Structures are given as C-alpha cells and as structure tokens.
Image (cartoon, coloured by chain):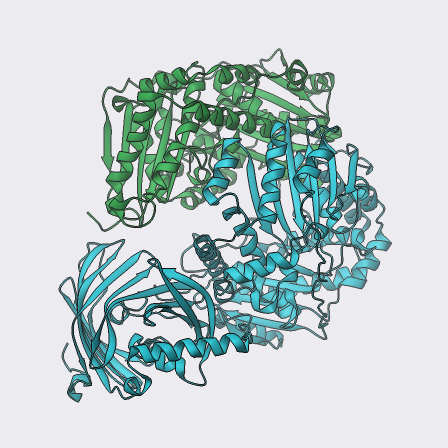
Chain colours: A cyan, B green
Amino acid sequence: MKRTLLLILAVAACGPPPKAAPIPLLPGDGDQHVAKPATPVKDTNDLWAGKTDLIAPPPAAAPSAVALPPLDEWKLANGLAVHVVRTERAPVVSVQLAIRAGRMHEPRARLGVSELAADMLVRGTRKRDANAIARSVDAIGASLAADATFEATLVSCGALAKQLGTCLDLVNELVTQPTFPDGEIAKVRDRIVKLVGARLTDPSGLAAAHVQNLLWGADHVRGWVNSEQSVGALRRDDLLAWHKQWFHPNNALLVVTGDVDPKRIRAEIERAFGGWAKTPVAQPPPFKEAGLSGSRIRLVDAPGATTAHVRVAQYGIKHQDPHFFDALVWNHALGGGAIGSRLSRVRIGERLYSATTSFDRNVDRGSFVATAVTRSPDAVAMAKAIVDALARMEKDGPTQEEVNAAIASITGGYGIRFQTAAELGSALLGAELHDFGREYLTNFPLAVGKVDVESAKRAAGEILDAKAYVVVIVGDAKDLEPALKKEGWRFQKVSFADAISPPAVEAWDPKSVAEARRLVDEALAAKGGKAKLAALKGLHMVQSGTTAGRDGTQKLDIDRTIIFPDKMRIDASVNGNKVVIALDGKTGWQLAPTEVDDQGKPGKVQLGEIDSNPTIEFERWREPDVILLRASDPAAQITIAADESIDGNAVSVVRMRSPFQGVEVFLYIDKKTKLIRRMLYNDHGRSEADDFDDYKVVGGLQIAHKRTSNNNGRVTRLEVKSIELDPKFDPKAWVKPTVP
Amino acid sequence: MSRLIPAVFALIAGIASVPGRPAVAQPAPAQKSKLAIEKFTLANGLEVAVHPFDTAPVVTVQVWYHAGSRDDPRDRRGLAHLFEYMMGKGSTRVRPDGHGQMITNLGGNVGAVAEEDSTQFSDTLPAEHLDFALRLEAERMRHLLIRPEVLDEAKVFAKDKLRREDSLLSRGFQKTLEVAFTKHAYAWQRTGLAKEIDAIKLEDARQFYDTYYQPNNALLVVVGKVTVEQVKASAEKWFGSIAKAPAPPRPSQAAPEPPQTQKRREILEGLGAYGLTLVGFRIPAAKDPDIYALQLSSIILGIGDSSRLKTRLRAEDPKVGKGPLAAETITEAIIREEPGLLVTLGVYGSAAAADPVEAAMLDEIGKLAAKGPGADELARAKSHARASFAFASESSQKFAQLIGHSWVLVGDASAFVRDIDEIEKVSAADIQRVVKKYLSPENMSVVVLPPRGKS
C-alpha cells in the first residue's frame, strides 16, 4: 500500500507527511531516463560497394593458453582457502575475500539481507566506526569495498604494496567484527530501499525482475524479487543472524594478487586471518526447478509508455556443464556478440532494432535472457523475431563463420581482462568459487577454441527450446494488447505497480508474541484502562505549531474532531491558508487551495471529493490515542523488537502488522511510565516517526500534549491547546458544502 | 590519476577526466625502467611514444590530436566534440562503424574522448594486431569521409549528450567557468552549445579536420606487449607517407585571460531542488612548477573522506538543523595546458545552508593559507597521489592516457614520469605558499545556486 495523503491530513494527525503522488515515471513521460529504441538506420547510397581496396581485418590468431604468473595456494588451519599470485607490473596489491553467502542463500522472509549486510560491513566494526574506517582507508590512498552477488559476499581492498598488512587487517576486521550499528543500518537501508524502488519503477529494471519471476516462479530464489518492503523490514538482528550463519573461514576464499613479497606473504596472511575461528557451516538451501511446459507471456502495463521493454528467457547452463564453452559460442552468434550477431540487426517495418542475449555464469543453471527495447507498436514483432531466432539456433546451430568469429572475439578479448592485480584477483576468485582453479583461466582460450559447429549445435539444441520460454513486455497495454491478440498469444496482464513477489509472512515466536501482549496490556493500564479507552466516543483537539521542511518553516493550526468509528473533520491553516477535510464512512470531501506554484503562492480554493481508500483507512486505524486498542485485539499480529532508548530513556518496542498490506507500526513504550513515546511506521521500507511527550491526564486518560513528527527532513511540531473527550458535534459539519 | 577525481565530478559535463600531473614515490632504479617511455618523431612531425610491457598479451594504441573544445571557432562551440562520433563513421577504405567492428571482432575495444585541450582515439586489442590498429588509425587521420548525413547524426548525438548531461551541477559548473574566464576558451565546456552545434556546416567540419587532424598535430601512443622496433616499423609504414601540414592556429592563445583582480560572485536563482555553491580559483598552466603543490592542496582540502572540506561540511551544524551542513562536497584542481581552475563545491538541501556552506569552505581555505597543512595531512595527500599513479600504471589503457595527457599538458609525452620526484619534494611551506597565492579572495569566483522557490 502506498500511503499518499494530503499534507494537511498527515500533519493534522501527526502522521507521516505526504509523499508525492505515485506518478508512474515511465517511458513517454520524458526522455531523460528512458532507454530509446535504436535509431533507425537510413539506407544511403553505399559508397563502399564494389570497392576493392577496403581494409580487411587480419585473421585472428589461433587461441593459445594465457600465461599467468605462478600461483601459491594453501589452506589455513581454520579452513580458509588462500590463493596468491605475484605480479610485478606496479607496486600495488589487491586483497579479495569471498564468503559463500549471497542472494542464493537468503531466506524467503529476508530478501535483501545479503546486500544490506555487505553494504554494512564498512559501516562499523568493534574497533572502528564508519568514519574511522573511511579515514583509515583514506590515510593510505587505498580503496575498500564490500558487495554481495548471487553466490557470495565479496570484500576487497586495493592499496600500495607496502600497505598490504593494513589491507589484510581491514578486510579481516570487516568480516570478523562487524557491529551493524542501528544508526548506520537506517541510512544504508534507506538508500537500498530507494534503489530498489527506482529499479522497480524503471521499465528496464521492472522487465528484468518480471522475467526472472515468471521463469522461476514463486518457489525458487531466482523468482523472488526484492521489494521496498522486504528490504525495509530488515533489522539488525537479521544481519547478526546472517553473519553468524555464513561468515566463517571454512566458508571463505582469500585471493591476494600484486606486488607481494613471496617470502613474507604466508606469515602475513596467517597473522591477519589465522585467529578467525572455524565453525560448522550449513548447506545452502536447495531449490527445485519448476520446469517449463509450454510458454508463458506476461504483459506489464505501463500506461503512457511509448517504448516497450522486451525480455525472452529460458533456463541457462551451469558453469560446470561440459557444454558451457559451446554455449558461449552459439550465444555470441545469436546475440552475445554485440556487433554482427544475428539479433544485432532486426528489421521491423521501417525500423532497425537490436537485441542482446546473455546467460549467467553460475553454479546453477541460471537464466538465458534476450533483451530489447522497441517502439510500442513493434514490441510483439520483436519478441517474435527473438523467438524465431532461438528456434533457428536450436535447430541448426551456428554456421562455421559464426563459430570462427565467436572464437576470435571471445579468445582475443580474454587476455585483455587481466591487466591489473584486481582484475586477475577477481578472475581467480570467480574460478575458485566454482571449483575450477587457475587452469580454468589459463586454458579458457583453448577450451573455447575447441568448440566446433557440431558441438555448438548440439549445445544449442540441448539448452534452447522454442516451445518453452517466457516473454515479458513492459509497455502500454493499449498499444500492446491488439498485437498480442493478433498473434494469438495468451498472456497474463499485470500492472507496473503490482508487487512481483508477494510479501513473505513470517511466523513470530510465541514467547515474543506473549511478551508483546503483556507490554500492550501494561500500556493500556497506564493510558487509563482498556474499558475507559474503549468507551471513548470521540475526541476534539485544537493544536498549533510549525512544520519545517526544505521549503522553510510554516505556521500550523489544527482543529480536529474524530467521532469513532469513522468520522473525522479537520480544519487547518498552514501559514494562513485554510484547508478543510471531512471524512464520513467511505466518502469525504476537502476544501483546499490548489498546489503551491513556483513563486510559493497557493492557487485558488477548490472543493474536491475524497473516496475511501487504503490511505485514509490507515490514517483512521492508526489514530495514536486509540492505537493500543488495535494492539490489544486478540487478532492483532504483534511481537517484540529489540529494546531501544529515546532521549536516554529505555523503551520497549512492540512491532505490529497493520491490516494494510506491508505497513508495520512499531510502538515505543517507555519502560518507566509505560506510555507510548514513539510510533514508527514502516511503509515499504520508508520509516516515518511521531514522538509523543508532555502527557497530561484528560478525563482519566493520559494524552500527549506535544507531538513531533519527523520524516524525510520535514519536522512538524504540534502542541495541544485544548482537548475535549466525547465532544458534542454537529452532523452538518460533514455535509459537503455547495460553494467553495 | 583518474582515481583522484571523485566519481561525482564525472557527472559534470565538461570535466573530462583530465588527470593533471600524476605522481609517485621516488622510484628505485628498477622501477624507473618499468616506466621507460621511448619517443621518436616521424619526418612528417608525428610524435610517437612507446611503452613496452608484457603483463598481458595486449596492446593499446591511442592517437591524440592536439585539438579540443578550446580550438572551437567562437560561433561553432561544440565542433571539436563532434569528431568523437564522426571519426568512427567511415573513411575512404573503411565502412561506417567498420573500424570499431573489426577491432571488436578481434576481441578488442575502441573509445573516443574529446576534451578541452585534445581529442583522443583508443584501440585496445590482442598485441599481435598492433600493425592493423595502426593502419586503421592512419586511415582515419587523413581519409575520413565527412558526409552530410554523418554530420547530422553527430549533431543529434552531441545534442543528446548535452541533454543527458544537463544537471544542476553541470549548469553551476558552466556558470563558474563563465564567471572565472571572461575571454578564454575554457569558459565553455567540450559539449558546446546546442544552437551553435546546429549552425555547424559541412565546410566547418571539413576545415577543422584538415586543420587539426594532421600528423604534426598528433601523438601516437603505443603501450603493451610490443617492441619499439615493431612500433617504429608499423608507424613508418602507415603514417610515414602522410604529408606534414602547416602548424595549426591556436585561437585560445590569441585570447588570453586577463589577470583577475577582485572576487567575483554570482547567484543563479530558481534552478534546482537542492542548493549548490561553487568556488573557483584561477590556477596556472600545467607547466608551472606550482602545480604540484596545488594538486596536493586540492587533496588536502577536498579529496578523500578525511580531507578538510569533507570533514567540515559533512559534520552536523546547528545552524541548519539536524544533519550535516552539506550533503556532499567535491574538490578538484582542473589542470589544463593553459591556466585552469581549482574548483570546490558544496551541495545542500536548505536555503539556510547556503551562507554557512560558503563560509565554511572559505574558512577552511583560509586556515590552510594561514597555518599550512599538518605533517599527516601532507603524507596522506602524497599517499593518494602515489596510489593513484600506481593504479593508473597497471593497465595499458590508463598508462597510455597518462602519456597522452602529459604530451597535451606540457608538450612532453614522458614528462609525467619526472613529476614523481617533484610531488615528493613539496613541503608544507609550499602548500601554504600556493594556497595564499592562488586560493586568494581576489582570485576567486563564487557561484551560488540556492534551492528553488526560496529567497
């Protein structure tokens, strides 16, 4: 659920301030961030036709083994596998450590934990906080990074050779002593949540996520898609558990490359990593391939889009598969070699497009995906052209010329990749992660060179299946549906805004649930008693204060009446501009000036309808003065979270799932007073908070007289001027006026 | 040296990754030989720089033309940049895109970058194809076909890039250049101006090509698993027959920037959702010996997490509420063949931060001028410079770039190797002296872009 709300409703209720309306930023809404179709190539007079003196490329050299410096490899007593290659080109070293803990190891209920944990490694250890880590790196001109891939978490440090010891120590410190401090988690998580959000509104990112989801389904890790909600729900405990489960020397690989001293390197590594204790490591969770019987097509409707993103996918090939090199070759001929491959020039009508194809290099089969962007009217024809090309490749394989070209390009480019110590290190790490060893790197060109037309054809026939594939098209359905129907393709239609992976609901530990219920009961008693609260018919509250954001500070006055269960009227004034909102059951209206213009002046006052929607329902549900009633409902889903402190006061934290999909509420209950000090709302990973203070007894109930809402830089402070319980009210106040 | 340049700066149109003058520690004799650069000149004036190394079976071939946006005619700004595109679009004996395709088919890659002082073309491929790469480069040096349709495509490409690179940062940077440079061609960025790009005629492009794309206005760089003899033979074979041309004109040298005598300050209102303050200081040309100390000064001030400006501006400031004073700050000494600019900027959210950010930036510069750097700061800066150089010398492409930039900036393809010692020699007193001399109020251009809709 996206809670979008008028500014005034939000601040009136001391709730989260508004977010921009969810305008789909999609192709056609402007061209700045939008992939465009290939520029049509004009047919011009061919000035070069018939020329005999054109420069021809030289024949490619026969593939040969790559000469690599000698490798030293051994295992520490704690099981850490070490590989060292000495290169002397420059006085630099690269230290790279891989922990076998990546996306493929993530539990369904903790999607995104590998990425968050990796990013958090540089944000604090038992010895240094984030700034101190950054300063240590900076002081020696080094670079330090951590990232998670599908298969592993990678930590790397590059520095001048004489700083090898510092690099080894830093990498060791990051993986053995991370503290995952809460303050840093909030920052890093927010950033990832934003990235995930951006990925899922970008048509290309959306197509990529949907195609994996459609191919692998809901029961395979490859089919799960991180959402703002899944990442936003991650907490420190999750990171600690993740670290405890996987970060062990016997589950890791260390590669050191560069200008190392061969006499001292073993001792240095032993000194840095020898004390890391060995611990049994669980097997990664197994996943079954659902298999593809027939083809599936998903249309992701993005209204207003003028371009369409097309993906066609099948299962790929394991890196360890003996036909892997054959697959490299036919893929190059099909669409992997950017220039000159079959799909590099696809003519649809007047226009020339291109598609690229690729497959993952992974321990499991992974995916084989073809990617293209076209004008909307050409998208279905493009998908068809890709499927036709797959079918031809499956049936006939590549030609001799294509095989030659692929071998020349793949093997020719191979040596170029290992110039720097870091490049050599990561290539070695990649090979070792898949249990290949350095021979893989040395002999790679030879292995590719052995591929012939027959073997490539056989591999294409085994992997490709033109009768079982998935297609995803992200674009405007009104442009795409007619073409899909014309082709007779049956398809599933979803909206660009739909969640791709439904949120995982995790069962909470019964002990924690019981503890949460006890805390809520205590808080209810402190508030004035459950019976008294339940008997409350309504509230009338007058508040005043300020709201301060990037646009400056504005004065705010609010007169708010709530009549339970579902009447709410707010008369507010923001810097003198009056706004009225009235909600009654499922309908409502508002009187408000139109949006503020560039000069800061509000437009004229308009009368508008408000339809019942989840946003408004949520605002009523989470009314702070009665939230404890919701929490004490036997059906409420609550548990406890780790204790925290607010302004030095210890608080217990109750975590509650709202009935609004994906939105959670955290109640921070003062350990001494048992009153609510903070309500934190977690909506798809975006956290917003209201703080409550200055409690006074009104009619037997403890009511906070000071509220501070803090969200995304906007701080709203309100003080209660008067409160009336069970107020008299005039039903006419909810009748929609006729003239604004 | 590209690691010296903060990634964010790469976003700004016009700040090409000019590496300035790299530096490393005083090398041992063996190390010096690792960096040996062999130079020779063909009869037609083509300079050649070769650096053999055998880490990988690779060669990078680059041709640097001493022609950049600085050489654009005043009413055709953006012309030099068009060659980034046009040089790959066909010559007498190579079809459009053929150059790139043939290299790619051999497993290699190509690149082209137009900057203020130069334009470079790069081919990296298996070393056994050295001769072929040189043949292709010689072909397009003098046989490019500048056809109307290619010029039209290049204009679309250039204007598209202008649009893509348009950002608050880019606009603020452009304004800073205009304020700092009142006469000189460094006042505009390499991408030029859309309306002047539109005005470029076929004749303009052909004339520019014939003026600047000549052997005696170019440097051929070869780095990789090759021998000097191989390069000599191939260079002579493919470039030797190209005739020498008249020395090209240098319009920018005819329009030198008059000395600045007082602080300049401009405010651009209502441009963006966030605020931006840029402070530029005119600095001398790359050849000036003060450049070493200035480069270290820029590192001490604003490069790296523990630099003075990053520490100061990222700290919480009660004047602007909770959170850091500025969201980001970037500093770079933009070193060019002719006098350049040291720029530092701060990005912030609220209008209230504008004055404190500017004051903090100037305060930190003032402190450095008053007291000079601490020993640890100077050591950190030198470590940065050393590490940057060491990493850049690892790959054939990056090392070729160091050679090319050295040739462009100081007229000597191997001069940067000698810079090694110079940076080590810089003392705290040198830093203090150059900061006083160049980062002074009368040499300063300030541009403020407050957040939109606020006074």
Name the residue nearer the viewer: A721 or B266.
A721
Q: Quadrant of the N terminus of chain A?
A: bottom left
How many marks can you see? 0
What residue is drawn where x is 66% and y is 64%? A313
Left or right, A608 with reference to A122 = left
Residue B348 in sight? yes
What residue is drawn where x is 13% and y is 79%? A739
x, y percent for residue A704: 25, 71
Name the residue nearer the viewer: A340 or A667.
A667
Left or right, A596 with reference to A277 = left
Q: Quadrant of residue A726?
A: bottom left
x, y percent for residue B153: 49, 42
x, y percent for residue A404: 79, 45
Q: Is residue B410 above or below residue A100?
A: above
x, y percent for residue A468: 72, 71
What residue is drawn where x is 79% and y is 33%? A70
Name the residue nearer the viewer: B206 or B48.
B48
Left or right, A267 with reference to B204 = right
Residue B75 in sight? no
Q: Is residue B379 above or below residue A470?
A: above
Q: Quadrant of the C terminus of chain A?
A: bottom left
Q: Residue furthest front?
A: A672
Q: Quadrant of residue B218?
A: top right
